[in-house]
Amino acid sequence: MNTIWIVLPILTLLMFDLGLSLRLEDFSQVIRRPWPMVVALVGQLVLLPAIALGLAYLFQLPPVFFIGLVLIACCPGGSSSNVFSKLAGGDVALSVTLTALSSVITLFTIPFIMSWATQLVGESVGITLPVGNLIKQNLVLMLLPVLLGLGIHYAWPDAARKMDKVLGKLAFPLLLVLITVFYVQHRHTILENIGSLGLAVTLLILVAIACSSALSRLVKNDARQRRTVVIEVGMQNAAQAIAIASSPIIFANEEMAIPAILYSLMMNIVLLTYVFVVRKKPLL
């Protein structure tokens, strides 16, 4: 079974659900509270890819995993971050806005960073990136579902709330199904590389969280904002990374999606632990 036919509808549903929960007035927070936005976006769009690049070199990852690690680091925030922010006592409106902003901004940053990473280590082993196809796929699977959900939110708000309630409950189980299917198909490759790759992925999450928390404190974000920033930076849209890696019109390489699968598992473990800790210690 080609997992692309599982991940594409899941990704589309996740982005559609994000659009359903959006309000245009949420974006006024960018002006009213710029520092939480700046810290989160810098952490997600700059720090995370830079840390991934450094770790990929440090662990001397093979090109396919090198590119896969940078890919998951380039992706926008995951839709589950909004739920995690709520559980952690964070700023949910800020979380929704950050997820939406990063989803739009990465339409432009992913092609740039991935083109550079592919030229850096991929072309020597035959891995190339058709940038035009990447942009087209992201527009169809990322932007259009968000705009459709946003349109329904304003045209039929009651229907949007009902759909959001259902889709919000489906998101995590659907991702678990995707991860399970992917693991079953690629368990031998995953187990062979779990040592260095698993450690690199775990360090990527932990270092990114530590840096975003430190930046948040530096600009004096309050506790609710700090929690949201940490969760937004740490939680990535693994479904998008898997869709890009395994898409037949882009990389067509399911092994490249293994870092995203491992990241998805570890980010939930690490961030659930973080949520548990901050609920016990309100000042964190």
Image (cartoon, grey):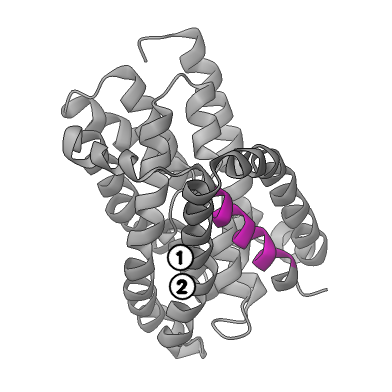
**Quarter where residue 251 is shown:** bottom right
Left or right placement of residue 142 versus residue 97 in this view? right
What stretch of residues is rendered in magenta? 6-17
Helix, strand or loop for disc 1: helix
As drawn, the residue found furthest toward the front would be 155
Between residue 104 and residue 218, name the one nearer to us.
Answer: 104
Indicate whether 126 appears above or below 28. below
Indicate whether 46 appears above or below 117. above
Residue with the mark numbered 1:
143
Q: Residue at x 65, y 71 (%)?
A: 255
Query: Quick check: can you spot residue 173?
Result: yes
Between residue 106 and residue 199, name the one nearer to us.
Answer: 106
Query: Quick check: can you spot residue 51?
Result: no
Indicate whether 96 appears above or below 68. above
Q: Residue at x 29, y 43 (%)?
A: 27
Report if the CB atoms under discs 2 and 1 are less than 8 Å apart: yes
Indicate whether 95 appears above or below 112. above
Residue 240 percent across, percent down from the top left: 55, 62
Between residue 160 and residue 41, name the one nearer to us.
Answer: 160
Kindly identify the amino acid type of the residue bearing the numbered disc 1. Leu
Residue 161, disc:
none
Q: In which quarter of the image is the C terminus?
A: top left
Between residue 141 and residue 205, name the one nearer to us.
Answer: 141
Helix, strand or loop for disc 2: helix
Residue with the mark numbered 2:
139
Residue 77 percent across, percent down from the top left: 45, 48
Residue 219 percent across, percent down from the top left: 16, 29
13 in the magenta segment: yes
Magenta part, dominant SS: helix
State the separation of the CA atoms marked 2 and 1: 5 Å
